[in-house]
Amino acid sequence: MQRIFKLKQRNTDVKTEFIAGFTTFMTMAYVLAVVPSILSKTGMPKESLFTSVVLMCMFSTFLMGVYANLPFALAPGIGLCAFFTYTVVLGMGYSWQTALTAVFLEGIIFIFLTVTNLRTAIAKAIPENLKRAISVGIGLFIAFIGLQNAHIVVKNPNVLVQLGDLTNPEAFLGLLGIIITGALLFFKIKGALLLGILITAVLGIPLGVTRLEGFQFLSLPFSSSSVFFKFDFSNIWSGDFLIIMLTFLSIDLFDTIGTLIGVSTKARLEERFEESISFKRGLLVDAISTTLGAILGVSTVTAYIESASGVTEGGRTGLTSVFTAFFFSLALFFSSLFLLIPLAAITPALVLVGLFMLTAIKEIDFEDYTEGLPAFLTIMFMPLTFSIVNGIIIGVLSYVFLKLLSGKRREVPIPTFLIALFFIVKLIIGF
């Protein structure tokens, strides 16, 4: 362990790394309930999805530990799951097999960009304020989905949406869960999101929302064969498919870079990035995991900011990730527990994740209208048009045009101009 993980150099030990690994698992185990619930809306079987999600969390986190020696855990991204389900499949009408194909190809491109160091040029193509706005917009989008799932927000033919009937058991349970989970976070309870989901699900039993038919505490893992290697390459030459693939790529790229830098700074691992060895390896693990995840039937896999919880407990090496992967492997035998959780009990996690992503708004420069207005439009168009892609298109186009009209053409990189030109052609031709 000393040779592989360099524990002494990082001033840590096996016991500390074990506690950190368990803390990270508890903090992000909510994804095992949330991700299958979101992706199953595409028509994919929830049982198979659960197995695939656990396997990818386990494999990618283990690989991050032993190859990159970093204390980061990976899982399918919640925002990217929402984009996969609500924009690509339910919004644009593509099959989930086509969406998985986009994720698979995005992963291959990500591997190429990482190996050739071209990821830097891609990262510079989207302005910093728009990157932050994309994160905020996705946060609002996810929270909106959570409120809809619990019928807290419902359709209205006259004003589009309205407040639902809060005496409805699902709406009441969802609101109660949000309050409970918020209190757990306030008191800094470890695994607050997971505990919030479980407590809400238990409270849903007397309300008739959580149904216990067929529940078993322990169960053998379900087969993932129904979602394994299910690709459809028939639409790969369409313009929409290219936008879908590039959106997956850009969000994954920026999320991973931000997470790696942010958590590593907290862990005081910045010196690793001066050599770029672990940073590059971490990105490569993320890219490989996304590609393999698509093969197993899940949306884009990315590093999770919740890894910071383990770092706070003293995790400094990849051994933390190895222990986290071990706890994910145990979750395979508790599938029945996670699968009985109703959508209303998932609502608190979605709303709170939306809150976490909203914090990036503090870093957006709203004083400069050529920066602030495109960021604002990006944020607003995502939940209001129920599409992450629409937010990105409007944000990029408004950014480029405002910079041109204000005489700040030099602030727009050439790749950004090319992306804007592509979006204009798409809007005119409609491909």
Image (spheres, rainbow, N blue to C red):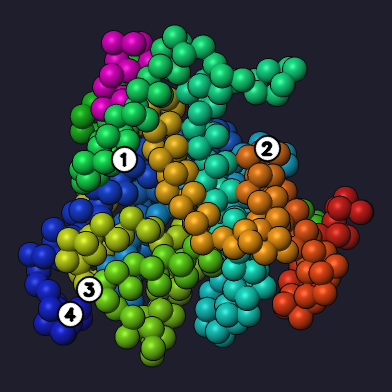
Q: Of callouts 2 and 4, which one flags the residue occurring earlier in the amino acid sequence?
A: 4
Of the two numbered discs 3 and 2 on the same chain, state the one appearing first in sequence: 3
Q: Which mark is residue 193?
A: 1
Disc 2 target residue: 384
Apparent side of residue 205 relative to residue 239 in the rendered image (left or right): left
108, 160: nearer the viewer: 160
Percent across and percent down for residue 99 are 63, 50
Residue 149's spot in the image, x, y percent?
A: 51, 26
46 w.r.t. 364: above or below: above
Nearer to me, 246 or 66: 246
Tag in front: 3 or 2: 2
Separation of residues labelled 2 and 1 (CA atoms): 26 Å
User: What is the CA distance from the residue labelled 3 to the residue labelled 2?
Assistant: 42 Å
Which comes before the other along the chain, label 4 or label 3?
A: 4
Q: Which residues are magenta?
A: 199-210
Q: Which residue is mark 3?
A: 317
Q: Secondary structure at mark 2?
A: helix
Mark 4 and mark 3: span between their CA atoms? 7 Å
In this figure, which residue is indicated by the disc labeled 4?
Answer: 10
